[in-house]
Amino acid sequence: MGILDGKVAVITGAGSGVGRAMSNLFAENGASVLVVDVVPDRVEQVVKEARARSQAKVEGMTLDLSLRESPDLMVDRAAKVFGRVDILCNNAGIMDGVRPVVDTPDGVWEKVMDINVNAPFRASRRAIPLMQTSGGGSIINTASVAGLFGGVAGAAYTTSKHALIGLTRSIAAHYRSAGIRCNAMVLGAVNTNIGVGATAPDPKGMEHLMKAMATLPRTGEPGEIAELALFLASDRSKLLNGSCIVIDGGWTLL
Ligand SMILES: NC(=O)c1ccc[n+]([C@@H]2O[C@H](COP(=O)([O-])OP(=O)(O)OC[C@H]3O[C@@H](n4cnc5c(N)ncnc54)[C@H](O)[C@@H]3O)[C@@H](O)[C@H]2O)c1
């Protein structure tokens, strides 16, 4: 028996890092999972891993969530394949080269907003009516300390994660009576591929970021974040709604 037995989860950015760890742990705990990522090889790999850990169904979908139609296609696919959506993990996210506002081109700003904010908004808009029909659900947004206390990450990234926390609180307040909970995981630094292949960071932005990084107690592992996600996804966290849970090893404590 797993604590997610019978539940269906849609996980974005599931091909790597935190999303990959969530996909595997959710499958291990009985959930059917739709693994969504823009990189096809990653989708294939994680589907294989998750299937090996689970009796439940695991399916993959390669999709670019920066495109307007993608979030609807993703939720519709899960509903078609699994018949319901109980858990939506808006986890896919990109960084912005740590650019201060004056050095941020429109293209970078827009892409970060499309993936980090607009896709979670659209996916939630599509999934919530399904959750209302089935009697409830759990939406988990992967935010960042840059979205609560931020100032030293790039302008677009910091703004996008603040917006994601706003979206979290809005959903939590509006749909609580329908049994739908929405919480945010507020990550510190985690050992993933988020910096790999990213455009060269802005030196001015990096100088600020490095000062903050100097006080980091330690880098987290994706599996440690997935444990929090598992709790938020399960009925064991029923009293948590609209919470923005900092998981940073104490980095942001004074
Ligand atoms: N790693 C950290 O230190 C850290 C800190 C704070 C917050 N976060 C957040 O954690 C989340 C997960 O990131 P991660 O650290 O696991 O990074 P990661 O790069 O290892 O994984 C992110 C995944 O998202 C996918 N993705 C990117 N753009 C996409 C798109 N347009 N459509 C679909 N998928 C797309 C990537 O292919 C990748 O597989 C992000 O929202 C990130 O902002 C990470």
Image (cartoon, rainbow, N blue to C red):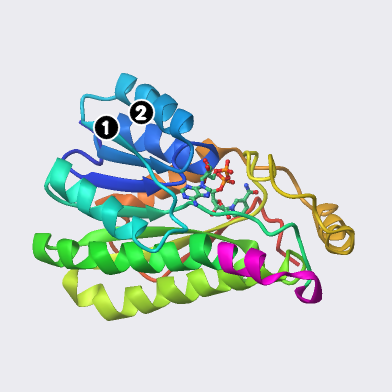
The answer to whether one can see residue 140 in this image is: yes
Residue 178 placement, left or right of 168: left
Q: Residues within 10 Å of mark 2 (few under 14, many from 20)?
A: many
**Label 1 CB-ligand 1 distance < 8 A:** no
Residue under label 1, please give it. Answer: 58
Would residue 110 be counted in the magenta stretch?
yes
Q: Is residue 240 visible?
A: no
Name the residue tied to disc 2.
47
Position of the C terminus, as image quadrant, is bottom right
> What is the span of residues highlighted in magenta in the rendered image?
101-111
Measured Cα–Cα span from mark 2 to mark 1: 6 Å
**Do residues under tags 2 and 1 come within 8 Å of each other at their CB atoms?**
yes
Q: Residue at x 27, y 54 (%)?
A: 73
Give the SS element for disc 1: strand
The residue depicted at 77 percent of the width and 51 percent of the height is: 216
Q: Is residue 164 above or below residue 39?
A: below
> Which of the 4 image quarters holds residue 140?
bottom left
Query: Position of 239 compared to 144: left or right?
Result: left
**Pick the front one: 90 or 220:** 90
Residue kind at label 2, given as amino acid type: Val
Question: Where residue 242 is drawn, which disc sits there?
Answer: none
Residue 31 at what x, y percent from top left?
25, 38
x, y percent for residue 58: 27, 32
Nearest the camera: 70 or 151?
70
Q: Quadrant of the N terminus?
A: top left
Q: Amino acid at mark 1?
A: Val
In the displayed structure, 237 sits above or below 11; it is below
Look at the image and say whether residue 90 sits in the magenta stretch.
Answer: no
Q: Quadrant of residue 250?
A: bottom right
